[in-house]
Image (spheres, grey):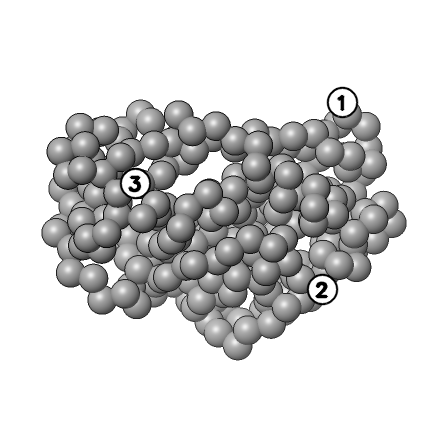
Amino acid sequence: MKIAIMQPYFFPYLGYFGLIKYTQKFILLDTVQFIRHGWIERNRILKPGEGWQYICVPLAKHHQKTIIKDIKINNCEKWRDKIFAQLNHYKKKAPYYTEAVQVIRKALDIDTDNITELNFNILKNVCEYIEIPFDCEIFSEMNLDIIQPENPDEWALNICLALKNVDEYINPQGGTSFFSKNKYEQNNIKLNFYKQTLPFYSQRRGRENFEEGLSIIDVMMFNPVNDIKKMLDNYEIL
């Protein structure tokens, strides 16, 4: 079995979904420390005029060492309304605005204060819309007995070993600097790295002002499903 393990990101960029499509099982790792200013509670969309802006989910106050699964959403704020207000400018120029907003509404329509549950629902609904399989589990709910990792690259290895039927682990290309292939090969697991090509597409503001690597929201706004699926197939295995 070919698997990937990622932290639960909020409306992540195209490459995250490429990784989901490429693998047979996807695991959301939510038992590690939450890091502020990452991608778990925010992502980037176009800003009216030029540049980009963040859309965010407000979080309740928490200790610095809180793990992801214990991070709570501050639902006292009307954060969904704010996000849709930030998306409203797409209506003037994005040909798939109506379809994209329907997906986003469905993705955010979950009664929870748990950021992992919210992001799981987002991933599930986006995958359904772009027609890719979503065989995904939340690590904290899997009840796997794993060896405690001593190094960052051992989280994935020890999860693979606990699952017992994994023969290939895929990590985003950013892990090439700290993952040890020898560790995986010694356990009969092939370690590969996934690199997504991020193509140009029209954002109705000119090629010279193209903003690369934005949230999948931006991709859905400007591209039909068939084109998105073709984008996902444009990758390299390193």
| Mark 1 burial class by Cα count in 10 Å: few <14, some 14-19, many 20+ | few
Q: Which mark is residue 102?
A: 2
Where disc 3 sits, the SS reads strand
**Disc 1 from disc 3: Cα separation:** 39 Å
Q: Which quadrant would residue 77 be assigned to in this image?
A: bottom right
Q: Does label 2 or label 1 sit earlier along the sequence?
A: 2
Residue sitting at the far top: 208
> CB of mark 2 within 8 Å of CB of mark 1?
no
Task: Give coordinates of residue 10: x percent, y percent.
Answer: 52, 53
Reading the image, the residue beneath label 3 is: 168
Q: Residue at the spot x=65%, y=30% of the render?
A: 199
Residue 208, labelled with which disc? 1
- Seen at 48% across and 74% down, the residue is 112
Residue at 55 percent of width and 73 percent of height: 110
In the rendered image, the quadrant that contains the C terminus is top left
Q: Answer above or below: position of 171 versus 29.
A: above
Q: Secondary structure at mark 1?
A: helix
Q: Amino acid at mark 3?
A: Glu
Answer above or below: position of 203 versus 237: below
The outermost residue toward the bottom is: 111
Q: First in sequence: mark 2 or mark 3?
A: 2
Q: Are marks 1 and 3 in contact (CB under 8 Å)?
A: no
Task: Kindly report which numbered mark, 1 or 3, lies closer to the viewer in this rendering.
Answer: 3
Q: Which mark is residue 26?
A: none
Q: Amino acid at mark 1?
A: Glu
Under tag 2, what secondary structure? helix
Is 203 on the left-hand or right-hand side of 159?
Answer: right
Specify whether residue 41 is in view. no
Q: Calculate the distance from the C-alpha at mark 2 to the C-alpha at mark 3.
A: 36 Å
